[in-house]
Image: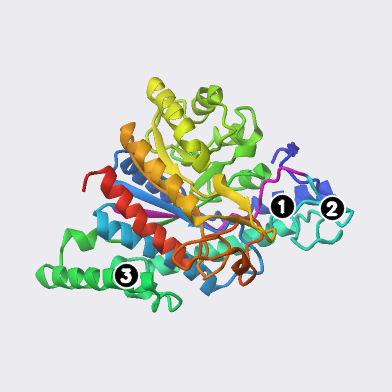
Amino acid sequence: MSNNINTSKQNPSWPNIEYYKEVIQDLQTYPNLVFPNEIINLKNELKEVSIGTKFIIQGGDCAETFKNFSDQVIKNKLKILLQMSAIIQFTTNKKVINIGRIAGQYIKPRSELFETRNNITLPSYRGDGVNSIEFTSEKRVPNPANLIKAYHQSSSTMNLIRVLIMSGFTNMENIELWNSDLINNTKLGKKYNSIVHEIQNALNFIKASSSKSPYLVNNKNNFYTSHEALLIDYEKAFLQNYNNKTYCCSGHMLWVGDRTRNPDSEQINFLSTIDNPIGIKIGPSFCIRDLSKIYDKLNPDNEKGKIVFIIRLGEKYIKKILPEIIKKVKYYGYEIIWFCDPMHGNTIKSKNGYKTRNFDTIINELKYFFEIAKSESINPGGVHFELAGEQVTECLGGIDDIKDIDLDLRYESTCDPRLNNEQSLEIAFLISEFIKVKENL
């Protein structure tokens, strides 16, 4: 391993750099979290997304934590993603692929290096993979040992996901296993369960008609993982050469955020060396003059299924900025897959001080995204959400009409607010309607 340790603003100030180097060297000896053939499978699926035959739901926690970790928590995340997929797939006849923000989302970017409370200034919380959210001088010191713990929890998560896939848990035939007691008796739960009933009847009919139905053969749901490529020393520990290409086997898809999207950033430089699918978050601060620099660096061969633009412009800016970006992409003939992240650009502070999002603005940005896709003749390839598998109260509105006062009940996120079960299902039904309008179904 090279002794050159990255020192950009997004890298923590490790108090013992030699110990940090030892941890990174140890990680190089650990088994990879994913495999090159899985990454290749995702790229092939993304090629189908790019031509409009498949759709992606990407979602999960803003930041995974050491505390909120169990088999049930992981299964709950899978369940809500699978439920959303079932709704969209059944109502639009479009195959839906799941990508989780999971098994690697333990490190968070920060705009400020320090945080001050009551005249006490400490290093900012950078995710459990670096330090603790507890506001004490001891807990806020970056600890390289946290990277080892983050790896082991990511590995355990991947092991569980693989067991669930191999056992058939993610197959549509087992849709009844995805039900959540939390939503069964709600209005949306009843609407969802009626779809479950229709799907089960259709599958039973197909089974009775032919045991070799193409529908059943192709009904297996793959599940992929993703996270932000932030700490590049960590990511480099999982590089693997396969068929003369280099893959980063810490996750199937990696993305770069608003803070690290500069064409000359270490994150972009690293991502330019690997063959994984790459997501690029596009926020209001995106400089359109950088588009060609970033794209040519990350995808010099203009490969289909390689680059995803994750649009996070907010309700306020999407109608102004997105058409300009699309026109530029078309002018250069770039192969782009278009996702909408309707959450990050719509973050507000509630009256009682919580960082939150309003459900209506989330829906509006999604609606505008599909309208612009239709008017500009591009394929809306997917959506990107921060969501929980539990009935948290972190985003305002939705069918339950969560208000400011309700945020106190179950605000559990360590960073950004997430959709809860019902809000996620409500969005899935709305996405189905947007897709049908876009495709004149």
Q: Are marks 3 and 1 in contact (CB under 8 Å)?
A: no
Q: CA distance from mark 2 to mark 1?
A: 12 Å
Q: Residue at x 46, y 28 (%)?
A: 325
Residue 165 painted magenta: no
Q: Residues within 10 Å of mark 1 (few under 14, many from 20)?
A: many
- Residue 203 x/y as whole percent: 20, 69
Viewer can see residue 330: yes
Q: Residue at x 16, y 71 (%)?
A: 207
Amino acid beneath label 2:
Leu
Count of numbered circles in the view: 3
* 330 relative to 100, above or below: above
* 6 relative to 154, above or below: above
Upstream in the sequence, badge 3 or badge 1? 1
Say how the picture is coloured: rainbow
Amino acid beneath label 3:
Lys
* 328 relative to 417, above or below: above
In the rendered image, which residue does mark 3 sit on? 191
| Disc ID at residue 126 | 1
Q: Residue at x 73, y 53 (%)?
A: 23
The residues colored magenta run: 95-112
- Front disc: 3 or 1: 3
As helix, strand or loop, the secondary structure at mark 3 comes to: helix
Of the 4 image quadrants, the one containing the N terminus is top right
In the rendered image, which residue does mark 2 sit on? 122
> Which SS type dominates the magenta stretch?
loop
